């Protein structure tokens, strides 16, 4: 029989004290686990595992400690049995995650200048573009913020492009995109009707916590990977531009009254008897703008800038308007155009085709011989274009000073002669355009003579050759009058009082730090750059002019462009830095740009005496259009990149001369002088030394030899690989020619 122990207060006190001390120790250890993992939640088993606790008594102590820490509001319960550290809410921030090619990421926050760095291990199943909640864990040695994704608020996309790899009982869709670091697991039953190597659209289903890849469902095959048509479809899908219009939209457009009505003509100013013509690229099908030229008896000149009246057909809140808004822009890929509007409008009713009566919205100016505007008028018009010119035809006439157009440049492949009225009009407009351009340059506008890469394609759209197009007088003629119309429309509305909500095309001042870096590099090359506020633009133009045609042109052009802000649409006017305009908008291309349609509506709205505009909705449209424009630009670049890689596919092991166009910690990009195709020489592939990336000088420096490879240097390379899937060229240095 066990005897009941007599109370021994001294022993009991000691035992109690030890128990309390043990509890405090356990509690401290539990708290340390949370503090070391501030963004993670744990249950008692996970805590015990981290503390290597196996016996029941100590596990119970962990449970008790969790209860105490919760009661003290040191930790929060996220779900039954799971807890997370209670921290300062200011440490949690929302934003969009941007994943880099290395797998690391940054949290982009529009209202904050500094992004948060997120190591690859802390991206926690988030994908590029997702809206996420990030816990700011610490600051790195360089003072920059670092964080961890704790919650995925919303996915950027549910559908992705990838290549199907079929196995016996399952499959994977490999996205192969530089910003995607996972593939999609496809269950066996989802693989029917799809073949290995297909480029497919995969729908994101789920990403279980214990799964290494998200689960997906294939919803469509685009065709065999590597096929030109397949890849162009993929590019359009990647950037959210549908190639086909919904049937309802096509029907709506088809049912529109696109005829020219007598009653409507009476409501417009009639320009049908004025000398009028269009100037566009050879391949153009949608003609946004036309120019009219009328000499007046007093020696002055009437110049009409006539723009397709898209707003006459695309009415607010119609399904056609909603579709145009969503697309926001036409997309110009190498081998096709994906229009903002259905073809019946873009290439038909709205297009200012020759010898066809068309509705237009016009800016009409009376000018003297010094190109000073003495009168201006804006309003709805009807025109009849006399002739359609290509830039090449107009340039030929300007160069030859002759009314005859040579068969080699003629759109008809036959020599022909234009009327004296048109010929004299083109010459006079060229004269006026040069005055306008000189005024812009004097006022501080920047001048970039960038070369465009173009392709000669065969019947199957394979690139046969690459050629370059630069801006000549014919291009500048059209450009200056479009700039004039855009500027004067913006001034017409922008200078009115009280202030009216309007859409402006703005361009902010350059980045000062990048300008300083440009000055430093230019100085090393023997060029001067004055960064005093009033001298910057003039000095930049002189620098661009001095380096034009020299080996360092690519370096200087690239660095100068990198200094510049992106031009955007906004209702908050800050002027256009690059053009040196206080007021500027987009009025001249409504067939291919939705903001231009809105500008037409606003102009008509205000001219009719209306006053009330929803400014918030206007700004929302501006943001949307700016975003879509940037996506379209990326799509166009991707299509060019693909065609360049396709062109280089049969040139493996061949040697080319190039210019270093970019330098990163991974290696250097080289642009080939013969065709402007760009590829990378990986730093690991450079023989003879260990090279280190120097961010300040945009160069790679040899650790032992001190050899320098920097932006603008000429090098010889050998084509190592042409990857059509990744749209990527791999080069190695040609050591025999180095």
Image (cartoon, rainbow, N blue to C red):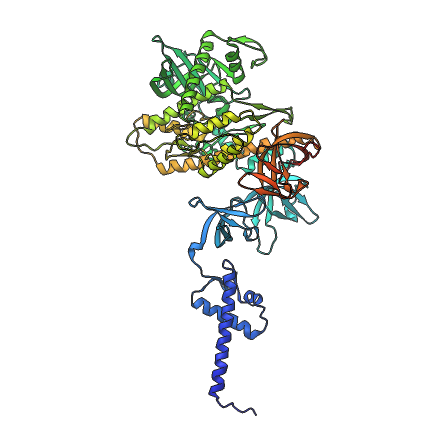
Q: Is residue 681 left or right of residue 260?
A: right
Q: Residue at x 41, y 23 (%)?
A: 442
Tell me the quarter of the image containing the C terminus.
top right
Place of residue 35 in the rendered image (x, y in percent of width and height, measured from the top left): 49, 62
Rendering coords of residue 605 (x, y %): 34, 28
The N terminus lies in quadrant: bottom right
Whether residue 78 is visible here, answered yes or no, is no
Front residue of 610/515: it is 515
Q: Position of residue 565 (x, y in %)?
A: 45, 35
Query: Could you say where residue 712 lies in the image, as x and y percent from the top left?
Result: 57, 32
Q: How many marks?
A: 0
Residue 577 sits above or below residue 480 on the image: below
Q: Would you place residue 539 above or below residue 426 in this image?
A: below
The answer to whether any part of residue 512 appears in the image is yes
Residue 99 versus residue 421 in the image, above or below:
below
Camera-nearest residue between 259 and 466: 466
Task: Tell which of 102 and 482 is nearer to you.
Answer: 102
Q: Say which residue appears at 49% left-offset and 32% top-offset.
A: 560
């Amino acid at each position: 029989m066990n005897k009941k122990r007599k109370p021994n207060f001294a022993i009991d006190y000691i035992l109690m004290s030890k128990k309390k001390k043990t509890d405090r120790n356990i509690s401290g250890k539990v708290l340390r686990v949370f503090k070391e993992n501030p963004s993670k939640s744990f249950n008692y088993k996970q805590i015990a595992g981290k503390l290597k606790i196996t016996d029941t008594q100590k596990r119970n102590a962990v449970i008790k400690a969790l209860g105490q820490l919760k009661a003290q509001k040191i930790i929060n319960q996220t779900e039954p049995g799971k807890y997370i550290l209670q921290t300062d809410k200011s440490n949690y921030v929302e934003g969009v995650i941007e994943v880099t090619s290395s797998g690391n990421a940054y949290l982009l926050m529009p209202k904050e200048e500094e992004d948060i760095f997120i190591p690859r291990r802390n991206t926690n199943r988030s994908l590029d573009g997702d809206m996420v909640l990030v816990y700011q864990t610490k600051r790195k040695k360089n003072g920059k913020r670092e964080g961890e994704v704790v919650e995925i608020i919303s996915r950027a996309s549910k559908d992705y492009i990838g290549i199907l790899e079929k196995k016996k009982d399952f499959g994977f869709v490999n996205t192969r995109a530089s910003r995607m670091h996972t593939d999609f697991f496809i269950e066996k039953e989802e693989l029917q009707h799809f073949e290995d190597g297909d480029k497919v659209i995969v729908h994101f289903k789920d990403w279980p916590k214990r799964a290494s890849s998200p689960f997906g469902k294939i919803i469509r095959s685009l065709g065999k990977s590597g096929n030109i048509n397949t890849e162009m479809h993929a590019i359009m899908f990647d950037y959210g531009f549908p190639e086909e219009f919904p049937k309802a939209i096509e029907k709506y457009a088809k049912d529109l009254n696109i005829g020219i009505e007598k009653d409507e003509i009476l409501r417009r100013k009639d320009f049908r008897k004025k000398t009028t013509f269009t100037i566009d690229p050879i391949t153009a099908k949608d003609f946004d703008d036309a120019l009219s030229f009328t000499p007046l008896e007093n020696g002055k000149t009437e110049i009409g800038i006539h723009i397709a009246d898209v707003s006459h057909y695309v009415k607010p809140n119609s399904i056609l308007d909603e579709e145009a808004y969503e697309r926001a822009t036409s997309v110009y890929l190498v081998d096709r155009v994906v229009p903002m509007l259905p073809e019946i409008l873009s290439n038909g009713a709205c297009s200012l085709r020759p010898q066809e009566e068309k509705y237009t919205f016009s800016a009409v100016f009376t000018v003297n011989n010094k190109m000073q505007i003495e009168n201006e008028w804006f309003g709805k018009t009807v025109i009849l274009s006399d002739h359609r010119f290509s830039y090449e035809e107009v340039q030929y006439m300007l160069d030859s000073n002759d009314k005859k157009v040579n068969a080699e440049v003629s759109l008809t492949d036959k020599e022909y002669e234009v009327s004296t009225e048109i010929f004299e009009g083109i010459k006079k407009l060229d004269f006026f355009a040069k005055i306008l351009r000189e005024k812009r340059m004097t006022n501080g506008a920047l001048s970039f003579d960038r070369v465009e890469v173009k392709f000669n394609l065969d019947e199957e759209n394979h690139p046969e050759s690459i050629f370059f197009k630069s801006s000549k007088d014919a291009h500048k003629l059209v450009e200056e009058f479009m700039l004039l119309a855009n500027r004067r429309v913006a001034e017409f509305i922008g200078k009115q009082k009280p202030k009216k909500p309007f859409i402006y095309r703005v361009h902010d001042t350059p980045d000062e730090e990048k300008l300083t870096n440009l000055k430093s590099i230019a100085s090393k090359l023997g060029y001067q750059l004055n960064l005093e506020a009033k001298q910057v633009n003039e000095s930049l133009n002189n620098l661009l002019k001095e380096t034009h045609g020299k080996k360092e042109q690519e370096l200087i052009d690239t660095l100068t462009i990198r200094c510049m802000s992106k031009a955007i649409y906004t209702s908050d006017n800050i002027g256009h830095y690059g053009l040196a305009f206080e007021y500027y908008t987009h009025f001249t291309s409504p067939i291919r740009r939705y903001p231009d349609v809105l500008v037409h509506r606003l102009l008509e709205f205000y001219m009719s005496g209306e006053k009330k505009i929803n400014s918030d909705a206007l700004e929302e449209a501006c943001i949307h259009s700016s975003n879509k424009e940037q996506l379209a630009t990326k799509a166009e670049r991707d299509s060019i990149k693909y065609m360049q890689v396709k062109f280089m596919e049969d040139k493996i092991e061949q040697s080319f001369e190039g210019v270093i166009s970019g330098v990163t910690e991974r290696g250097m990009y080289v642009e080939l002088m013969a065709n402007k195709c760009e590829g990378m020489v990986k730093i690991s592939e450079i023989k003879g030394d260990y090279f280190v990336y120097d961010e300040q000088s945009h160069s790679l420096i040899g650790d032992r030899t001190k050899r320098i490879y920097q932006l603008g240097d000429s090098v010889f390379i050998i084509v190592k690989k042409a990857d059509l899937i990744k749209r990527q060229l791999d080069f190695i240095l040609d050591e025999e020619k180095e």
